[in-house]
Image: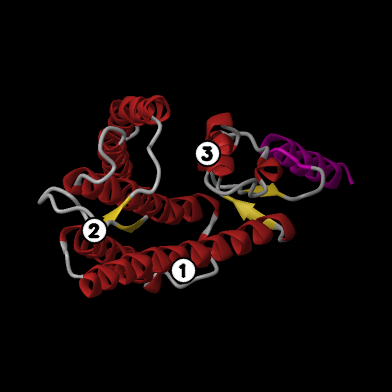
Amino acid sequence: MANYTDCTLSRCSRVFLTYEPSLAGNAVFLTLFAVLIPLTLGLGIKYKSSIFATTIATGLALEVLGYIGRVLLHHNPHDRSDLILFLIGTIMGPTFICCAVFLIMPRIITVYGEEFRSWRPLWYPFLFYALTAASLVLELAGGIASTVQDNLEQINTGIRMLVAGLAIQLVALAIFVGHAMLFAIALRTRHHTLDDKFAILYNSGLFKAFLFGTGGDTGAEALEVAPSADTTIPLRATIGPKQSNLQHQQQQQNERQVFNDK
């Protein structure tokens, strides 16, 4: 983007794209994001994850608005309203999607066990939600100020606010990725006991694909366990050879039988 010093029309922005956005390419992304919105909401209703699905759908809807702005900018790269639509949509949309990822991480921790978390439960929501809220406010204010204002100093202030919002989002992502890596390392290196009520979830291909999509493999191959009728005996999952709950019970019965024979 660059300053447009020759524009005198009221609809023209002093900040504008220095290239002509591709009509076909942006139309494809617009269609893809639009198709994902009803799918996301439908899955959220089906699996009772309305907050997560709504957050994702909000991010997707903002992406749709952003790409609508890009399509319109194909015809006039200097239009003020189209530029605002493009900036707000394509910058704030990913922030909402990142927020949805932050929402789902505590649930993954609950499935595997609280002993594997690398953060305190009290400060996790405060830190990530506060960083996300600050990022959204700065992105919104900076995006509007950098395109609506005509004064060069105010435009530069808006751009700095926009960059600050993006920087805060990157900091939040870096902290999240760091803790996710510590969590994955803990799963791979510690011997641990798992509650067999989540065994079906552990073995689900969809759940493993979800983990891969949210940050890579987190040691899911170490969790090949099977549900048991006796929920009082925990399943043991290790990196080495694995033993099912039924086999464990059979081994105990054999040991008792040997003891009685003696």
**Front residue (pair 171, 261):** 171
Q: Earlier in the sequence, mark 3 or mark 2?
A: 2
Q: In whole angstroms, how far apart are the C-alphas of marks 3 and 2?
A: 43 Å
Label 1 close to label 2 by CB (< 8 Å): no
Query: SS of the residue at dot 1?
Result: helix
| Display colour scheme | secondary structure
Residue 171: numbered disc: 1
Left/right placement of residue 182 relative to residue 240 reads: left
- Disc number lying in front (1 or 2): 2
Q: Can you identify the residue that label 2 sits on? A: 14
Q: Amino acid at mark 1?
A: Val
Query: SS of the residue at dot 3?
Result: helix
Q: Specify whether residue 176 is in view.
A: yes
Residue under the point 24% across and 62% down: 146
Q: The N terminus appears in which quarter of the rendering?
A: bottom left
179, above or below 66, in the image? below
Left/right placement of residue 116 relative to residue 43 reads: right
Q: In whole angstroms, how far apart are the C-alphas of marks 1 and 2?
A: 30 Å
Q: Can you identify the residue that label 3 sits on? A: 210
Q: Amino acid at mark 3?
A: Phe
Q: Earlier in the sequence, mark 1 or mark 2?
A: 2
Q: Amino acid at mark 2?
A: Arg
Query: Residue 91: image x %, image y %?
Result: 34, 52
Q: In whole angstroms, how far apart are the C-alphas of marks 1 and 3?
A: 23 Å
Residue under the point 59% across and 42% down: 212
Residue range (magenta): 242-262
Q: Residue furthest right?
A: 262
Does 230 lie within the magenta span?
no
